[in-house]
Image (cartoon, grey):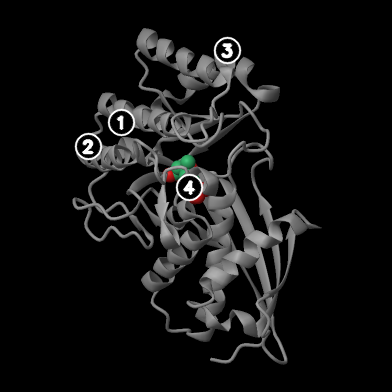
Amino acid sequence: QEIENGEVSWQAPSNIALVKYWGKKENQIPANPSISFTLNDCRTTTRLSYSKKESPSDSGNFDFSFYFEGKPKEDFKPKIQSFFERIQQYCPYLKDFSFEIHSENSFPHSSGIASSASGMSALALCVMEIEKKMYPDMNPDFFNQKASFLARLGSGSACRSIDGGLVVWGEHEKIENSSDLFGVSYPYEVHDIFKTYRDTILLVDKGEKQVSSSVGHGLMHGHPFAESRFEQAHKNLQRLIPVLKNGNLEEFIKIVESEALSLHAMMMSSEPYFILMKPNTLEIINKIWSFREEMKVPVCFTLDAGANVHVLYPQDYESKVLEFINNELVAYCQNEQYICDRVGKGARQL
Ligand code: PMV
C-alpha cells in the first residue's frame, strides 16, 4: 500500500541482563548468548512522523531531525544516521521519506542508566509500524521479530527490549529457536517468583561513561580471557534453565552476581583496562552481602558497564529491601537517588 505521511508512536522499556552480552562479531552478532529481564518503568517514548519526499535522497544521508525531550539534539544524530545506514538494506523505503523523531525517557537522563536499549528498540518499532502501513497483512510475530532484528543493529542489547518477561538473545544449544539475529521470549517454564521480580537501581554515578559499550565490546577482541568468558556465559545460561523453573534463589543469586563481576573482570583485564565500579559500588555490594546473610533475604546485585547497582529481589521482600535501601544504601547514591523498577510486559504502541 502507498503511504504519504503520518505519525507513529511506540514506548519501549530498558532491560537488565542476568547473563551478560560482552563482546561481538561483525554485524552486531553477539560473541555469547545473554538473557535479561525486561523492565517496566524505565522507558523511552518515541514519536516518528514521516512524509513522502518528491524524490528519494540519493546522497548517503537520511532526511531526519531529532528532538529529545522537546529540544533539537544534534549530538544524537550521528547515532541515528548510522542506525539508518545499517538497517537501510532491510528497510529500503527509508530514503523515500523525511522524518521527524521525538523521543523522551521516563528516567532522568544522564542518570548513568543506558537509554540505548529502550531508545533503539522504540525507534525500531516505529520504523516497523511504518512498514506495517505499507504491508497491512503483516504477521504480528514477524513484526516483533523484525523490530528486534532492527533494534539489534542499533544497539545489541536493544533487541531484548521488545518482548516482556525474560528474553534470550544469541544462539544457545539448549534454548530452542534462540538466535544471534534477534531476541526471543524465553521459551521454557518460569517460576512465578520471577514474573514479578523487582529491580531497584541505585544511582551511584551519573557521570559520562568512561568507556562506550562499542569500545568495551571491542576490547574483547584479543582479550586473553575471551574464549573462557564466552564459554562461561554459555554455561551460566544453561545453569539458569532449571533455576528459572524451580525458583532456586540461592543458585540464581550465585549465577547473577558472578555474571556481573565477570563482566567487570573483563574490563579490568583488557588492554587498555578500566575500573568502572566506584568505591560506593563496592560499599553497596558489601552491604547487600551482609544484609542477605544476616536477614536471610534473597536479594542480590547486578551491574551494567558502569558504577550503578541494580538490586534484584522477589516482590514479597519489597518492603524489607526498600527499608534496607533507605536506611543503609541511599547514603552511597548520588543525591540519594534510586529508581524502583520491576519485570515488565514489553514494548507497547501508543
Ligand atoms: O547494547 P550495548 O552494545 O550497549 O551493550 C550493553 C552490554 C551490557 O549492558 C553491559 C550487558 C548486557 O547484556 O546488557
User: On the rendered structure, is 170 left or right of 320?
Assistant: left
SS under mark 1: helix
Quote the CA–CA distance across marks 1 and 4: 25 Å
Q: Residue at x 66, y 36 (%)?
A: 111
Of callouts 3 and 2, which one flags the residue occurring earlier in the amino acid sequence? 2
Quote the CA–CA distance across marks 1 and 3: 27 Å
- Contact (Cβ within 8 Å) of mark 1 with mark 3: no
SS under mark 4: helix
Residue 163 position, x and y percent, is: 42, 56
Q: Residue at x 61, y 53 (%)?
A: 44
Query: Residue 183 lies in what quarter of the image?
Result: bottom left
Q: Amino acid at mark 1?
A: Ile
Say if 16 sits above or below 180 in the image: above
Q: Residue at x 41, y 52 (%)?
A: 24
Quote the CA–CA distance across marks 3 and 2: 34 Å
Tell which of 335 and 327 is nearer to you.
Answer: 335
Q: Which mark is residue 218?
A: 4
Residue 122 position, x and y percent, is: 56, 60
User: On the rendered structure, is 243 left or right of 150?
Assistant: left
- Contact (Cβ within 8 Å) of mark 3 with mark 2: no
Label 1: how many residues lie within 10 Å, few (<14), some (14-19) or many (20+)?
many
Question: Closer to us: mark 3 or mark 2?
Answer: 2
Q: Amino acid at mark 2?
A: Arg
Could you tell me how many numbered marks the image carries? Answer: 4
Q: What residue did someone put label 3 on?
A: 327
Q: What residue did someone put label 1 on?
A: 255
Q: Amino acid at mark 4?
A: Gly
Tell which of 197 and 283 is nearer to you.
Answer: 283
- Contact (Cβ within 8 Å) of mark 3 with mark 4: no
Question: Closer to us: mark 3 or mark 4?
Answer: 4
Say if 84 sits above or below 224 in the image: below
